[in-house]
Amino acid sequence: MRAKSNIFSRVLHCLLLIGVVTCEWQDFDFSRYHHQDDIKKLFDSYVEKFPTLAKIGSIGKSGQGREMYYIQITDQVDTAEPGEPMFKYVANIHGNEVVGRQLVVYLTQYLLENYGKDERVTNLVDTTNIFLMPSANPDGFESTSPATADDQVSQLCVGVRGRTNAAGVDLNRNFPDQFRARQNDPIQPETANLIQWIEKNAFVLSANLHGGSVVASYPYDDSVRHLQRGMYSPAPDDAIFK
């Protein structure tokens, strides 16, 4: 359990440092948000530049047919190393919460550009199988605001538009509940893709990046009575989380 906590702290440390990265991809505009295809092109360039460290994949398609891309980063990306822990960051499950989406893109760049240069980053990549998904809700993101005249995503991702997926379902509340037998909404394609991805891979630690408030929610933040306040719901790993 201590190892899991150390993995999270090391990846979080890298996430906090990404502001110091200097971009070497001159054809990628880091001053704005990007379409899913833009991120795919950027990830492809990472894989081309770091073929032994990075691999791009998709867990499936969204309701509107957009690929749900992730990038895998580790020192032997084509080899399953026994005992190496698998970690994942997933962002933008609420399409209008865009900060996490950008941070995952920047974290990708930070890890790859600093491998072999920064001891902490090198050790992290050498000892952890890292998976980074910029958007779990690409359809919601695309609807946050109209495209500008030159077909770029607007800088203004504000309000609640795009929070849900294209079917109007809050994906963050669409997963099976440990206390609730029936779902309020049918399982969405994006949710099903995530569930299958999780079930097929032995992730030992994960985090879902949101935006809007300074909150850290740990599993399992619910109770059989579904009280929204005044009820402490400790996880089996409660001592570690503290």
Image (cartoon, helix red, strand yellow):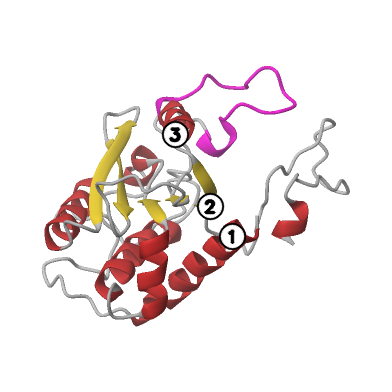
Q: Quadrant of residue 48?
A: bottom left
Relative to 193, residue 139 above or below:
below
**Which residue is at a point 29% across and 58% down the rendered structure image?**
154
Magenta: main secondary structure equals: loop
Relative to 169, residue 236 above or below:
below
N-terminal label among 2 and 1: 1
Relative to 223, residue 176 above or below:
above
Q: Which residue is mark 1?
A: 3
Query: Picture coordinates of residue 139 (x, y %)?
Result: 34, 38
Question: Outermost residue toward the right?
Answer: 230
Task: Assess disc 2: are there few (<14), some (14-19) or many (≥20) residues with their C-alpha within 10 Å of its C-alpha.
Answer: some
Q: Which residues are the magenta region?
A: 170-190
Magenta stretch holds residue 179: yes
**The C terminus sits in image quarter:** bottom right
**Which residue is at a point 71% across and 42% down the rendered structure image?**
220
Mark 3 residue element:
helix
Task: Give the residue type that dot 2 points to.
Answer: Ala
